[in-house]
Image: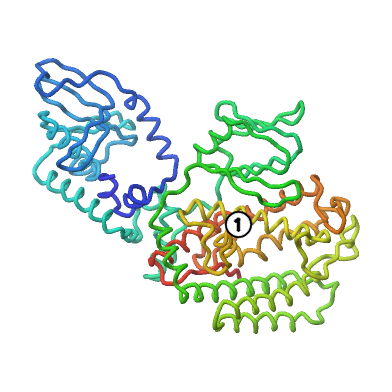
Amino acid sequence: MVNEWVYCPRLAYLEWVEGEWADSSDTAQGRRVHKRVDRASGRLPAPGALGDETSRVRSVTLSSERLGVIAKMDVLDVRNGVVMPVDFKKGKRPHVAAGVYEPERVQLCVQAMILEDNGYRVERGAIWYAGSRERVPVILDDALRTRTLEAIRDLRAAAEAGVRPPPLEDSPKCPRCSLAGICLPDETNLFKTGHPPRPLNPSDDPALPLYVQTPGARLRKRGQRLIVEIDEDRVEVPLIDVSQVLLFGPVSITTPALHALMRAEIPVSWFSMGGWFLGHTVGTGNGNVAVREAQYRAAFSEERRLDFARDLVDAKIRNSRTMLRRNWRAEHGVDGKERTLAGLTRVARRARHAQDAQQLLGLEGEAAAIYFGSFGRMLAQGRENGVGEFSFSTRNRRPPRDPVNAMLSLGYAVLTRAMTHTISSTGLDPYMGLYHRLRHGRPALALDLMEPFRPIIADSTVIQVVNNGEVKPNDFVMNGTACSLKPSGRKAFMAAFERRMATETTHPLFGYQVSMRRLIEVQARLLARHLQGEIASYPHYLPR
């Protein structure tokens, strides 16, 4: 952490104080390089018992009460009563004047000072670069020792102050940083400098959700693979390729599989056979208390809640208007289109000046009546394969009473699950909302954040599966007045939903290409930055 503080104070703060972590090819390669030296071997004698022998000791952990630091040292070379710490690095030797970059020199100096505080004599250190197979000596002079003490003091002071350091500006360090997607350096700086961000975030996460929805299916683990067993058939999936597991209805999962998923921080989401979201099974989760503290302060401020809610309802209405403008089908005629769009514009404008939450709820309901009153105009009619048999007159739920409403309810349930997972992974509390009323077991903040995404993701998926004929009228079953999807229809709908989540779009504020799945994570992290005061206002997602 002292190394990282010298390299980038914000990176050290995110990892050490806020507990953030993300893997990358660099971190994976670093673990491979350290695999051997992380295996303890040899024994370090007491300071008075070193003698003149030569020995090498691996993976030694020592601490210094004076400095208040602890270090796990890769290799200690002992010769003639002198101990030399050797630190292993994955890359090649840098061609710099000091032979070694400053963060690595400071890290080695910390180890040397810890050894000295434990009574050992240290004259120099060394860095072993695995990439070029070179050992580079490091001189532990007074200037390096002073810099090291300064770094330790500053890191501890930042942790005690509880203030995250600002991001680096246009730094070449950011593109290779594994935490770039968490730190959002350029995105955060945009609100101060106005400079468009570099595309530091990957456009999408290569890991994907695993859906298990066949009744009687069983999910178990073997090695680093998950195995789905259905009667005599089975499907194997590498654990590293899974971002979430979603279990529908009467399916089971073994304890070893559940433990592996919790250790990997991969959530398991449970749904009823009809698609009702029941809950999560997760590991210890994100322990970032500072983010939740800022969230609770905002939640207890009536003024901040109302400011956020005004923008939220405005964004939802504007995105609903965008869906109608884009998808209004010619076969329904254009009568009423401009009137409908103008009506939504007026309600959105009024929402920006609402006096309280009750007025906002009324305006949100008024906009929903306008939007769903014209929702059927986005569905194809008179086509083959039963496409024209889908109709929509009004939004109904609990239970939904027709196929379109059944798909809308399922889409909202799955989107709620995605939002709850993403919000939890950023350290925010999904149950402490700013607009939706707090209720036991209700993920109010997830419902808040998903409002602008309802039409863009869930409604868009419903329109797509109907107009493309991916879900047929015979994919539904009626139970009294309740309508729900059969397994075949739900499978087709989920496939379309995940395609929508993987669709790349241009972020309207940052200008780079990003998938809807990644965009939701970026938005959740921006909300955390806003709540902690790093950015003045939360920018809702508003596609053009």
Residue 278 visible, this angle: yes
- Left or right of 344? Residue 2 is left
Kindly tell me whether residue 173 is visible in this rendering. Answer: no
Q: Amino acid at mark 1?
A: Glu
In the image, residue 381 above or below residue 56: below
Which quadrant, please, contains the N terminus?
A: top left
Specify the color scheme: rainbow
Relative to residue 415, is residue 308 depicted above or below? below
Figure quadrant of the C terminus: bottom right
Question: Which residue sits at x=9%, y=16%?
Answer: 52
**Residue 293 placement, left or right of 280:** left
Q: Which residue is mark 1?
A: 504
Residue shown at 58% from the left, 67% from the top: 436
Give coordinates of residue 498: x percent, y percent.
67, 51
- For the point 35% across and 60% down, the residue is 170
Residue 3 x, y percent position in the rendering: 26, 44
**Side of 286 relative to 489 (left or right):** left
Q: Is residue 318 positioned above or below 456 on the image?
A: below
User: Relative to 104, is 439 above or below?
Assistant: below
Residue 254: horizontal and vertical position, in percent?
A: 62, 31
Foreground: 281 or 54? 281
Q: Residues within 10 Å of mark 1 (few under 14, many from 20)?
A: some
Q: What SS does tag 1 mark?
A: strand
**Residue 239: image x %, image y %?**
57, 35
Residue placed at 38% from the left, 53% from the top?
A: 174
Question: In front here: 315 or 476?
Answer: 476
> In the shown orientation, is residue 95 left or right of residue 308?
left
Q: Quadrant of residue 403?
A: bottom right
Q: Residue furthest top?
A: 53
Quadrant in the picture for residue 259 = top right
